[in-house]
Every structure is written in C-alpha cells, then in structure tokens.
Image (spheres, helix red, strand yellow):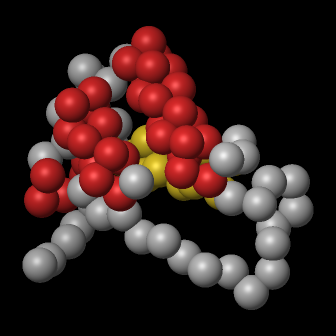
Amino acid sequence: MAESLAGLAKDMLSAKPATIQILPVALAHTPLGSPIYVEIQARDEEHRSGEILTDFLKEVDAVTFETFGVRCRIRYFRFPASFLAAIN
C-alpha cells in the first residue's frame, strides 16, 4: 500500500520521491466514525488543481479500500511551501 500511495503522490501530484513520507500510526482505540483515517499534508502548488486533487483522492480511496476492505476517512491539507522547514 505504501508503495502505491507514494506512486500516486509522485505521478499525480508531482511529488519528489525523497519528500514523500508515509507514517502508519497505531491507535489505542478505534476512532469514532471510521476505523481508518488517512491524512495527507502537502505543499500548495499551482499545478495541484481541484480536478487533480479530486482524482488523487479517488485513487487514494481505491488503494486504501483494496487494502483494508472498508472506506477510510481521507483528508488532504495544503499549506504554503514557506511554512515548511526540514532537515534530513
């Protein structure tokens, strides 16, 4: 699944492979609403238009449904590139 999601980010959002991070987080309790939650955080780039994001989210939904057999709660957050500072 991680490879599929990374491929989607690279192919559909033009994300640089070295900047893609996929972090599975186990929870002590099942969250309310949906048993699985997917959060995507990405730089706001001009080429990531509404239509591209809609298609991307549909593909993420397909990959996660194929993996888990349930519909996941998927949220996408955009932020200006100037908000990010990172090392390593």
Please tell me which residue lies in front, 57 or 88: 57
Q: Is residue 76 visible?
A: no
- Above-or-below relation of 71 to 47: below
Quadrant (top left/top right/bottom left/bottom right) for the C terminus: bottom left
The location of residue 4, given as percent across then percent down, is 33, 45
In this picture, residue 22 sits left or right of residue 17: right
Q: Name the residue rendered at 54%, 76% in the picture.
A: 25
In this picture, residue 64 sits left or right of residue 19: right
Choose top left, top right, bottom left or bottom right for residue 29.
bottom right
Please tell me which residue lies in front, 70 or 47: 70
Choose top left, top right, bottom left or bottom right for residue 15.
top left
Quadrant (top left/top right/bottom left/bottom right) for the N terminus: bottom left
The location of residue 28, given as percent across then percent down, is 74, 87
In this picture, residue 18 sits left or right of residue 41: left
Please tell me which residue lies in front, 79 or 61: 61
Choose top left, top right, bottom left or bottom right for residue 26.
bottom right
Q: Name the residue rendered at 13%, 47% in the picture.
A: 16
